[in-house]
Image: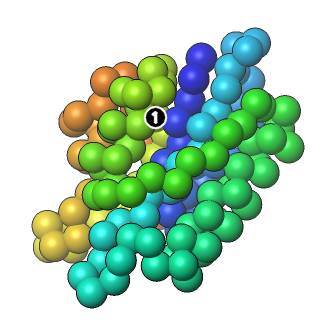
Amino acid sequence: MKILIGIDDSATSKRALDYVSRIRWPAGSTVLVATVLRPVFGTSPDDPERVKFSTDLVERAGQRPREAGLATATRLLEGEPGDALVAAAKSERCDLIVVGSHGRSGLAKLLLGSVASHVVTHAPCSVLVVKGEQRLNQGR
């Protein structure tokens, strides 16, 4: 099984990494940890500081599944996160994409978008969305 974990610098990405690292996957499974260097107005995608930050982020994140005994590779992708993850899953022939969800809704989701929603809708394979901490008894 080939598993793609899409990460950013958030607690929900850490939860997704931890979730994948705790599961007993079939023998021979591999993990591809990827982060996306998103275009930012006024900066180049080749900006050395942004590239170094993203490269360090994905390399650190790749340690978690490695420590759990999973064969792991890392990738730095470019573009819009949802599109880049879907394209990577296609080109790498992944069986599963794992992403964290920030749990945004309403106006925040409309303004900021939802990478998880985009991936679920457009992925060529199954998608596992790891949610943030659930708040029990909301509104009670």
Q: Amino acid at mark 1?
A: Ile
Image quadrant assignment for residue 69: top right
Image quadrant assignment for residue 2: top right
Q: Nearer the viewer, residue 33 or 13?
A: 33
Q: Is residue 29 left or right of residue 79?
A: right
Q: Which residue occupies 14% across, 67% down?
A: 110
Q: Can residue 60 be spotted in the picture?
A: yes
Q: Which class describes the residues within 10 Å of circle 1: few (<14), some (14-19), or many (20+)?
A: many
Residue at the far top in the pictured view: 27
For label 1, the SS is strand
The image shows residue 9 at horizontal and vertical percentages of 54, 69
Q: Is residue 124 left or right of residue 77?
A: left
**Circle count:** 1
Residue at the far bottom in the pictured view: 42
Q: Which residue is mark 1?
A: 97
The image shows residue 10 at horizontal and vertical percentages of 53, 68
Q: How is the image coloured?
A: rainbow
- Against 104, residue 122 (above or below) is above
- Against 124, residue 77 (above or below) is below
Q: Is residue 44 left or right of residue 97?
A: left
- Against 36, residue 39 (above or below) is below
Q: Which residue occupies 46% across, 34% down?
A: 97
Q: Which residue occupies 31% across, 70% down?
A: 39
The image shows residue 95 at horizontal and vertical percentages of 48, 20
Q: Is residue 70 left or right of residue 117?
A: right
Q: Can residue 140 be spotted in the picture?
A: no
Q: Quadrant of the N terminus?
A: top right
The image shows residue 59 at horizontal and vertical percentages of 70, 57
Q: Quadrant of the C terminus?
A: bottom left
Q: Which residue occupies 31% across, 57% down?
A: 79
